[in-house]
Image (cartoon, grey):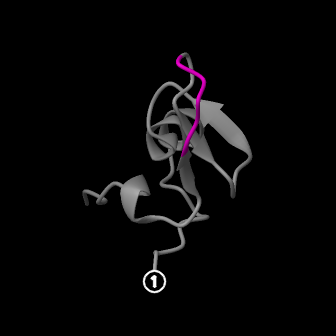
Amino acid sequence: MVQKRVDCFKCKSLYVTWDQRFPYGCKAMGFKSKNIPSVEVYKASGMNCQKFAAKS
């Protein structure tokens, strides 16, 4: 079964940083990264992000 990847651009927690090395951040998970946060979460845990909260 193929799971659909979480789209961080539709999540309340995604923010864009001023740091050119780490342009994306996740308020819910508390980190900044070079890639979209859901990709980093999947790489680290093998699971989709569990903190996704859709924008209103």
The residue that mark 1 highlights is: 56
Q: Residue furthest top?
A: 21
Where's residue 31, x and y in %? 69, 39
Is 24 rendered above or below residue 9? Answer: above
Residue 21 in which image quadrant? top right
Q: Residue furthest bottom?
A: 56
Q: Is residue 17 magenta?
A: yes
Q: Amino acid at mark 1?
A: Ser
Is 37 rendered above or below residue 5? Answer: above
**Chain part drawn in magenta:** 16-20
Q: Nearer the viewer, residue 37 or 47?
A: 37
Q: Residue furthest front?
A: 18
Q: Is residue 10 left or right of residue 49?
A: left
Residue 36 in which image quadrant? top left
Q: Is residue 39 left or right of residue 21?
A: left
Where's residue 11, x and y in %? 48, 64
Is 28 rendered above or below residue 18? Answer: below
Q: Is residue 1 magenta?
A: no
Q: Nearer the viewer, residue 39 or 44?
A: 39
What secondary structure do most residues of the magenta stretch adopt? loop
| Residue for point 45% across, 83% down | 56
